[in-house]
Image (cartoon, rainbow, N blue to C red):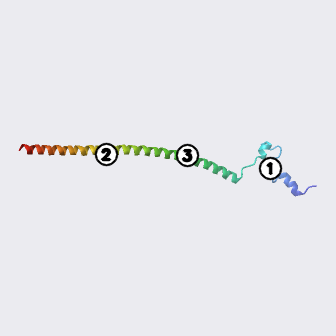
Amino acid sequence: MTTPEYNEWCIRRINDNIPMPGQGDSLSIEENLRVLPSELEIIKQDFEKRNAELEKKIEQLEEEKMHLGLDMDVQKLETEKLRKGKNKAEEIWTKRSRLMDVKRNSEWFRRKMEL
């Protein structure tokens, strides 16, 4: 002897995850018992995915920073080389100017002696 509520429950299979035999899609026991991920697990998976993407981006930025640092070192070396070249040119120009002054003075002295 069963109650009407029990009969209704059996008919509609309320709160029952076991499919009724003869339904169109026959799922295996493993598929029926598969646990769906919770909202927290989904959020954790999204976090881990985003974290992995950010770590990859950080690695790329660090590599770019290293290359920029190397470029900067090369630029510093080139600047120093140009600065040394400029200093050498200024030194040569100064010596040339002094020689020209000496030459002018010696010509002036020679003319004065000839008079």
Q: In the image, is residue 54 above or below residue 5?
A: above
Residue 102 in the image: x percent, y percent? 18, 44
Residue sitting at x 9%, y 44%:
111
Residue 38 relative to residue 9: left or right: left
* Number of dots carrying numbers: 3
Dot 2: within a 10 Å radius of its alpha carbon, few (fewer than 14), some, or many (20 or more) residues? Answer: few
- In this view, the residue farthest toward the right is 1
Foreground: disc 1 or disc 2? 2
Residue 8 relative to residue 71: left or right: right
* Residue under numbered circle 2: 87
Foreground: disc 1 or disc 3? 3
Q: Are marks 1 and 3 in contact (CB under 8 Å)?
A: no
- In this view, the residue farthest toward the front is 113
- In this view, the residue farthest toward the left is 115
Q: Earlier in the sequence, mark 1 or mark 2?
A: 1
Residue sitting at x 87%, y 55%:
6
Q: Which mark is on residue 59?
A: 3
Residue sitting at x 78%, y 46%:
32
Secondary structure category for the residue under label 1: loop
Alpha carbon of mark 2 to alpha carbon of mark 3: how far?
Answer: 42 Å
Q: Nearer the viewer, residue 13 or 109?
A: 109
